[in-house]
Amino acid sequence: MSDQHSFETLAIHAGNTADPLTGAVVPPIYQVSTYKQDGVGGLRGGYEYSRSANPTRTALEENLAALEGGRRGLAFASGLAAEDCLLRTLLTPGDHVVIPNDAYGGTFRLFAKVASRWGVEFSVADTSDVDAVRAAITPRTKAVWVETPSNPLLGITDIAAVAGVARQAGVRLVVDNTFA
Ligand SMILES: Cc1ncc(COP(=O)(O)O)c(C=O)c1O
């Protein structure tokens, strides 16, 4: 897909190729766990087991990546599953994360009740205030986490400005836009 396509066109076409087996114009829902291989390690289209990848999910992930102008999209069964995966991918014990002072309750509990038990520290900041975010970053900070609009207070964070602060500090920026 080229950048020439509009959002609406991408929404319909990105990641959505006709099914090679039947010509179905939208990808069928693949309700399968295991895929036959053509030999050891000989995967057809990269599929071996639906937990790792599934053509229906691939279509969604490619579509979302195109709409967001991203390199890859990853789809999860729930927002908290995505957050948990992200935490365990990015962080190791001793790392620190700056989270919003009005973070979604489930996100706060994930940090306060789960990640903290594995040695991940966090502190809160008003992420609508770029200086407050900058001041909250410590030498152990690995990520700044923002929610915009935030749940429940509908706070707005300037993503570009906070991205600049994060980049300067060499830390990742996580944006949860569930409410958008
Ligand atoms: C800002 C925000 N992040 C994450 C979640 C969690 O999403 P899920 O319920 O799919 O785990 C929610 C749910 O309302 C939310 O509002």
Image (tube, rainbow, N blue to C red):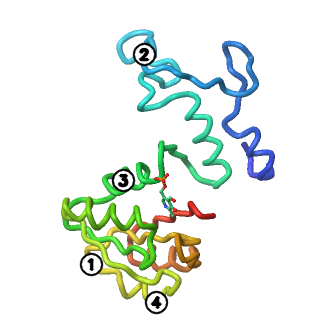
Residue 44 lies, in percent from the top left, at 50, 18
Q: Which of 52 and 41 is in front in this view?
A: 52
Instruction: Of the two numbered discs 3 and 1 on the same chain, state the one appearing first in sequence.
Output: 3
> Contact, CB < 8 Å: mark 1 with mark 2?
no
Q: Quarter of the image holding residue 159?
A: bottom right
Q: Which amino acid does label 4 sit on?
A: Asp
> Contact, CB < 8 Å: mark 3 with mark 1?
no
Instruction: Of the two numbered discs 1 and 2 on the same chain, state the one appearing first in sequence.
Output: 2
Q: Which of 77 and 130 is in front in this view?
A: 77
Q: How far apart are marks 3 and 1 (CA)?
A: 23 Å
Which label sits on residue 131? 4
Instruction: Of the two numbered discs 4 and 2 on the same chain, state the one appearing first in sequence.
Output: 2
The residue where tag 2 is placed is 42
In this rendering, which labeled residue sits more in front, label 1 or label 4?
4
The residue where tag 3 is placed is 84
Which label sits on residue 139? 1
Categorize mark 2 by other alpha carbons within 10 Å: few (<14), some (14-19), many (20+): few
Q: Distance between the residues labelled 4 and 2?
A: 52 Å
Q: Residue at 19% of width from left, 61% of height from top?
A: 117
Q: Which amino acid does label 3 sit on?
A: Asp
Q: Does the residue labelled 4 lie within 8 Å of ligand 1?
A: no
Does residue 29 appear to the left or right of 6 in the view shown?
left
Does residue 164 appear to the left or right of 22 in the view shown?
left
Categorize mark 1 by other alpha carbons within 10 Å: few (<14), some (14-19), many (20+): few
